[in-house]
Image (cartoon, rainbow, N blue to C red):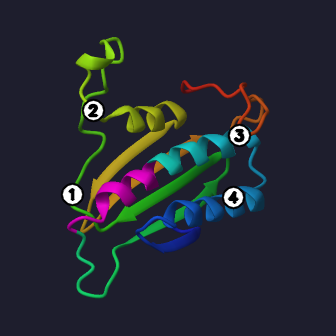
Amino acid sequence: MPAGRHAHIAIGGPAVGEIAGALDDFCGAEQLPEDTAWRLRVALDEIIANIVAHGASGAPGGVGQPAVLDVWFSRRGDIVEVTIADDGPAFDPLAKPPPDVTLPLEARQPGGLGIALVRALMDDVQYQRTTRNVLTIRKHIDADGPAGGAGSDEHPTEQS
């Protein structure tokens, strides 16, 4: 698997917070701009929450063995890469067409907004099925990007 910092977490409710803490540590150590860190936090939160909600079912943890996920954080120059691997059933979130947000709410099919958000926040999103689901997100660090922190109204929601 990829080089860089690694977190190995049991899939469950605390996983989102544990991964968020590992990401915050990585962002601090790498001195990432707040806008880049915010985008990574939102995207990773969405991905991990979906794995916790859906990925644990059918995972090959076995009796007494919790399903796990692994997250690797790395930086190569001005590119940050986060790779998430889980043992859940095969599922490619990129295979679904983007949701039609122009339809009235009652006519929309559920699902798909989270991965649309991840795609909007990241510069590259790739899925691969090995013996696990492996999702890799990449973000270019824009030194001239907007400042501001989580909760600020200044964060763009479209890909820069």
Residue 54 horizontal/vertical position (percent): 30, 56
- The answer to whether residue 73 is magenta is no
Q: Quadrant of the N terminus?
A: bottom left
Residue at horizontal 60 percent and vertical 50 percent from the top: 80
Mark 3 touches mark 4? (CB < 8 Å): no
Q: Is 111 on the left or on the right of 117, as rendered?
A: left
Residue at horizontal 31 percent and vertical 25 percent from the top: 99
Residue pointed to by mark 3 = 150
Q: Amino acid at mark 2?
A: Pro
* Nearest to N terminus: mark 3 or mark 4: 4
Residue pointed to by mark 2 = 110
* Nearest to N terminus: mark 4 or mark 1: 4
Instruction: Quadrant for residue 64, please give it.
Output: bottom left
Residue sitting nearer the eye, 77 or 53 = 53
Q: CA distance from mark 3 to mark 4?
A: 12 Å
Prevailing SS of the magenta stretch = helix
- Classed neighbour count for the residue bearing mark 3: other residues with Cα under 10 Å, few (<14), some (14–19), many (≥20): some
